[in-house]
Image (cartoon, rainbow, N blue to C red):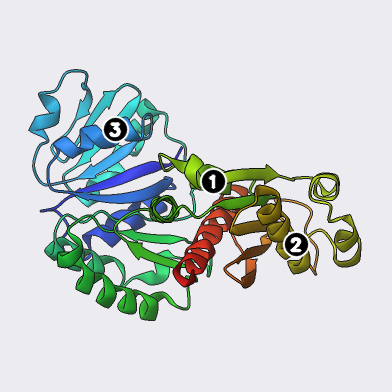
Amino acid sequence: MRSLIVFSSEFPKEGELFKALKALDDLGLAWESVHIISDFREVEGLAKAFLGKPIFVFGSRTPQSLLEKEGWLKLAEQEESLILMKRDSPLFFIREVDALSSLVPKLNLAGLDAKTYGKTIYLFPCSQGVRETIWETLFPNPEIFTTKCHALIHLVFQGEKDESQGFFQSLMERVKDALKEKVELFYLGPKFLWQEVGEELLKRRIKVGVAESLTGGLISHLLTETPGASNYFYQGLVTYRTESKSHILGIGKIIEEKGVISGEVALEMARKARELARAEIGIGITGLAGPGGGSVEIPVGTVFLGVVGGGKEILRRLAMEGDRQEIRLQSACWALLLLKMVLEKL
């Protein structure tokens, strides 16, 4: 099970955030996201939103607002750490990063596993000062992103657009420069990528059709996360097997000629998805998520993604690394990123 990492806004000092992430990795603990909060009461909301996931909270003060709330059970307490539990959501409150190692014997209380998971980071700074601290402490250490295209980075900031816009732009340039040899996909905005794309489609009433293979409906799932999605999402087809691509999409001939995992098939899937949904934009994706079935020509992680619309056809061949879940998630987010690019030109 992957965990969340939460920093109170007064806590991050120079090097502390990277030190905490490195310590968790060294202990073999899986983590998926980083949140920066200004009030411990926000942890209650995270516990509800990520029900059942372990949460590591770093802060120099005792979370009195949590202790006073009903339902939090104190499992253990030391001078430098505190463990709470509520509705199967374990909360590890850490006053000193070095105290992480002393928690290891107690982790079984929360049923934590020790499988390291690829890094997908969501940053929620609460002020520009904290944002700058995150930049200074995390990104001078890009070695935490171990493999090119292994990490999909969402830098998501909450705050007023006018106050944040200049900072976003300067940060993006620095992030690109610092991580361009490690990470290939960036999205920087006030919301999650799928939220921004969904809201743009809803506002403009642009219809989308999808034909998926290796992602198994994940693109359709993300596109329908926005309330009112029926106004723009007309149809999603999961043509997982080769036979279904032939029978449902009618692209058997091109599959025979080019192979089921090919750019030509991805583009034809996108064209058929648009045609069958009577939509303005079509998305098609085919590839190999693994863990088996790869070859020299088509290794595991090979993904072909096509997006057609607005008189344009975009085709990308992606070389993903990571486990099956990571490859599928990255592929779906790449699809949304290319969809966003098409929307910007319509």
Q: In this view, does 12 lie to the left or right of 55?
A: left
Q: Which of marks 2 and 1 is in front?
A: 1
The x, y position of residue 7, in whole percent, is 21, 49
Which residue is depicted at the point 35% across and 58% down?
A: 22
Which residue lies under the disc numbered 1? 233
Residue toward you, 4 or 225: 225
Q: What element carries label 1?
A: strand
Q: Which amino acid does label 2 sit on?
A: Glu
Cα–Cα gap, marks 2 and 3: 43 Å
* Residue behind mark 2: 268
Which mark is first along the chain, 3 or 2?
3
Expressed as whole percent of the image width and height from the top left, the position of residue 161 reads 20, 62
The answer to whether the residue labelled 2 contacts the one labelled 3, judged by CB atoms less than 8 Å apart, is no
Residue 22 vs residue 344, the one in the foreground: 344
CB under 8 Å between discs 1 and 3: no
Quarter of the image holding residue 257? bottom right
Amino acid residing under circle 1:
Phe
Residue at (28% x, 23% y) in the render: 86
Give the residue at mark 3: 47
| Place of residue 292 in the rendered image (x, y in percent of width and height, measured from the top left) | 75, 51
**Mark 1 vs 3, N-terminal side:** 3
